[in-house]
Amino acid sequence: MGTVVGTVEDCREMFDVSVQTMITSFPSTNQIGNPVAYKLVRVAGDGRLVPATDEEILEVNETDMHSVSDACKSLGYLPAEGSPSLFSQLEETSEVINLGLLRSDNVEPSTDQVNSQPEYSEDERLVMVHASHMLSTPPDSNIQCCNENNMFDEDQAHHEPLPFSSDVQNGCDVNQSNTVEPSSPKESAFPAAAQKPDFSLVRGEICLDNLPIKALQETFRATFGRETTVKDKTWLKRRITMGLTKSLDVPTTNLTIKDNKLVGNQDKSSDVADVVSKGDDVTATNLKDAPSSSAEDFSCEERAAKRVRKPTRRYIEELSETDEKQINDKSVFPSRDQRLSEKSEVRSMSVSSGKRVTVTRVVPLGGSEVEVPYVSHVRRSRPRENIMALMDCHTSCLEAKATAGESNLLNSEVVSPGSVLKSASGPIQKEGSHNNSEENILTGVDEDMETDHVDSSGNSSDDYNNTGAPMMQGVGLRRKHHRAWTLSEVTKLVEGVSKYGAGKWSEIKKLSFSSYPHRTSVDLKDKWRNLLRASFAQSPSNSMGSLKKHGSMHIPVEIILQVRELAEKQSLVPPSQR
DNA sequence: ATTAGGG
DNA sequence: CCCTAAT
């Protein structure tokens, strides 16, 4: 800045004024995430600065906003690299973010650049950005600047000339004659600068380092409107930069949260408040403390506002499958990048997200760690699921035994049915496999298997697992297997219903489905319900029977009819009778 | 323990 | 299929 002020006299005033203007005349109530709005000013005929019109602002915003957010996204991680600079990581973060917010080009400075180019500190970069934007520096100057630093290569490519650049330029010229602030001794410091206002302006800006303390002080004065006695170059630079950052940041970052903070923290966070309103009292007093403390505060605020994670779509405990998948995909929560990209929403949702999200843990997955809510990682309700499989199997086995002719053998082994079954029953196994094949056919083209099903205790736990659901491994997997109903099963069901009546599921189960251990009475009931629906659904067009689009087996018309018939019967005859 | 229903 | 409330 010092450069700005010093090099380009005429523009200095403008700049000075612009800062003030931005702070005062543009209330913090301004549009959210509208950094550009604050930067856009035009120089009227009399050389005064006039806020850009809505249209103008919009115009610029359209092009800028996206890129800005992008920049933020990409910038978000810079701090992770942790450059051993003067500032803490946090501070760096906030600054980087700010930088992102301030930028209006599709620039994506890489971490490498930041770290590998010690000559240009964050401050300087910020300043540079500020300068170019606040002053609405003409594109060409920007480009120059870019070349100069080799930092914003993309700038050149994507940079869109600001609408008023010309105006500004003119304004500068006009101003040249009217020095608003004659008190500044900058002229002596930078005599040559006046020649090429734009370029030199920006350029000088960039090289804060090279400026004499005096110049820095001058800049400081220009920025905050007050003198400073501080001689610390670094501090000055920093202060100046922050001043600018803040002034821009307040309106920009400002959301409800931000507002609250401003209101509540006023005294505490001398940063925002001071810089924006009072200037800085700290300046003279605490040379060393001021920077660090303020920085910390700031970073804290920033974090509070931004760091909160957005609540991802609600965690669905429903299907363990899903759970697994999500976890594996690391999609339970948006990845860091994602989260950052959604930064815009972050602040607003901090509240809602607070509770759930806050409680998280880091889970190492495939090398990277993922944060997952403590809650849903565990089985949501009862612990049973694991057992269920076994239970199921168990029961099935028992059933099988019960109905099976040679169950005796099996009965003896109540303890470990699965293993026993597997090993103990040669023939049974066979049956099981047979059963399997049937089941696997699914479409159940047709089978009379049921007849030969005879006993089929064959359903060993293995069988189960193979056919149906994934083994309930470890923590909460559940959802039994999805076994499509075979035609034979359906047939049996219908038959059973006709025999014993709908609702006698346990009966049917016992009598007709003894050989289908995996079909519980509930299953029967459900299936029946489905059949009913299907039958009704198909009633309109008989042909529909096989027209069913996909998945489920095509229910033969006969069965449909049968079902319908039964349905009528059932409905007519109250359950009491049956 | 079964059923009926909702999800 | 799963889960629950109601029997």
Image (cartoon, coloured by chain):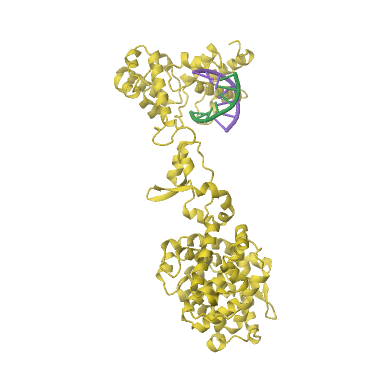
Chain colours: A yellow, B purple, C green
- Left or right, A62 with reference to A412: right
Q: Is residue A354 or residue A466 the one in the foreground?
A: A354
* Residue at 35%, 14% in the rendered image: A407
Please tell me whether residue A370 is drawn above or below residue A271 in the rendered image: above
* Residue at 29%, 22% in the rendered image: A423
Where is residue A456 shown, x and y percent of the image?
Answer: 38, 17
- Residue found at the far right of this picture: A46
Residue A251 appears in the rendering: yes
Q: Quadrant of residue A104?
A: bottom right
- Residue found at the far front of this picture: A285
Please tell me whether residue A271 is drawn above or below residue A385 in the rendered image: below
Where is residue A512 shown, x and y percent of the image?
Answer: 47, 14
Please tell me whether residue A373 is drawn above or below residue A341 in the rendered image: above
> Which quadrant does the N terminus of chain A fall into?
bottom right
Total labels: the figure holds: 0
Where is residue A574 shown, x and y percent of the image?
Answer: 63, 13
* Residue at 51%, 25% in the rendered image: A554
Where is residue A255 shown, x and y percent of the image?
Answer: 61, 59
* Residue at 45%, 68% in the rendered image: A87
> Which quadrant does the C terminus of chain A fall into?
top right
Residue A3 appears in the rendering: no
